[in-house]
């Protein structure tokens, strides 16, 4: 069983590289389940639309996770209630539309895959305590009892919070990956308890940028120049960034984890 997890899809550049490369990536690596963070997939890099979610599902994405930009498009609050394959952070305020975790089937329908979407508390929008939320969900979804495999997308700003989450889930989840910062870290590994981990799996988008945004305009904003405009995504060739996790069918834990970086300026 092979899991593919890809980082934040950033604007049109990110969508293009995903649409062009994902089908072959699935085929060549015999991928059984695909998770993509899509909260930046809109043209302006803020939010996701129903059409974009449908386009992603058509090319092989099984689940779309998100983060602090999930509500940036008003339409999302309506269709997320019906589309259980689009997740929002589980620790948003009670009563928020949609769901923060769900159980799905692998492409061949043989295995149950649980996916949990969490968002950090530090330097992020106000949310419920992420560790208490994680604890509650762990009591509801147990590896090898309720699901064959369990993946956690932790959308957060700081590395320590992500690392603590990785160790919290170690032995309880197949894989824990961080998203949000758009820069892939070099700590891809399997933790002591058998859980695959990476602090941040980066983004799918143009890395000749400032975390996916146009670099010239970003510099102007840092310099507080008057002609700087609202941030907008870079539109160059995109890089596909994430991990492939080979699982142990008996334990549900990770057997091997491989960092992937395909195409664009980051791969050169």
Image (cartoon, rainbow, N blue to C red):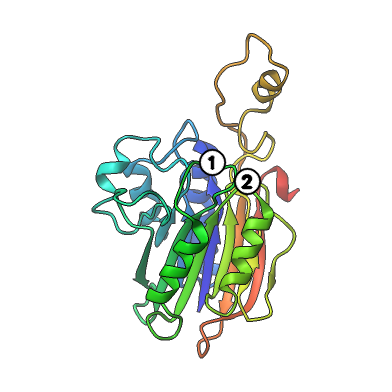
- Outermost top residue: 226
The mark found on residue 182 in the picture is 2
Q: Position of residue 52 (x, y in %)?
A: 38, 44
- The number of callouts visible is 2
Task: Locate residue 234: give its quadrant.
Answer: top right
Tell me: 219 left or right of 117: right
User: Where 247 sits versus 80, above or below?
Assistant: below
Tell me: 124 left or right of 182: left
Residues 152 and 257: in front is 152
Element assignment for label 2: loop
Element assignment for label 1: loop
Residues 179 and 206: in front is 179
Q: Nearer the viewer, mark 1 or mark 2?
A: 2
Q: Position of residue 247 (x, y in %)?
A: 55, 80
Q: Which residue is mark 1?
A: 10
Which residue: 33% across, 57% down? 99
User: Where 40 sits versus 228, above or below?
Assistant: below
Residues 193 and 54: in front is 193
Q: Position of residue 245 (x, y in %)?
A: 58, 72
Q: Position of residue 84 (x, y in %)?
A: 30, 58
> Which sits earlier in the primary sequence, circle 1 or circle 2?
1
Which residue: 44% across, 54% down? 65
Q: Are marks 1 and 2 in contact (CB under 8 Å)?
A: yes
Task: Locate residue 214: give its quadrant.
Answer: top right
Which residue: 57% across, 25% down? 231
Q: For the residue carrying disc 1, how many other residues have a C-alpha within 10 Å: few (<14), some (14-19), or many (20+)?
A: many
User: Where 85 sits versus 103, above or below?
Assistant: above
Q: For the residue carrying disc 2, how many other residues have a C-alpha within 10 Å: few (<14), some (14-19), or many (20+)?
A: many
The mark found on residue 251 in the picture is none
């Amino acid at each position: 069983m092979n899991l593919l997890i890809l980082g934040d899809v950033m604007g049109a550049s990110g969508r293009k590289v995903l649409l062009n490369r994902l089908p072959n990536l699935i085929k060549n690596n015999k991928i059984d389940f695909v998770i993509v963070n899509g909260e930046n997939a809109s043209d302006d890099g803020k939010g996701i639309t129903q059409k974009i979610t449908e386009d992603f599902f058509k090319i092989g994405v099984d689940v779309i996770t998100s983060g602090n930009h999930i509500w940036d498009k008003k339409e999302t609050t309506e269709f997320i209630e019906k589309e259980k394959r689009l997740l929002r952070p589980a620790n948003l305020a009670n009563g928020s539309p949609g769901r923060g975790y769900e159980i799905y089937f692998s492409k061949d329908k043989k295995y149950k895959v649980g996916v949990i979407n969490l968002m950090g508390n530090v330097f992020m929008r106000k949310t419920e305590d992420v560790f208490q939320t994680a604890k509650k969900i762990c009591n509801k979804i147990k590896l090898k009892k309720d699901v064959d495999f369990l993946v956690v997308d932790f959308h957060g700003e700081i590395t320590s919070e992500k690392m603590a989450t990785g160790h919290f889930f170690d032995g309880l989840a197949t894989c824990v990956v961080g998203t949000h910062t758009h820069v892939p870290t070099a700590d891809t590994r399997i933790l002591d308890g058998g859980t695959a981990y990476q602090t941040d799996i980066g983004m799918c988008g143009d890395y000749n940028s400032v975390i996916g945004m146009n670099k010239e305009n970003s510099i102007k904003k840092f310099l507080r120049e008057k002609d700087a405009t609202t941030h907008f995504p870079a539109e160059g060739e995109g890089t596909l960034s994430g991990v492939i996790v080979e699982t142990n069918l008996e334990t549900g834990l990770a057997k091997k984890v491989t960092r992937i970086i395909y195409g664009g300026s980051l791969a050169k």
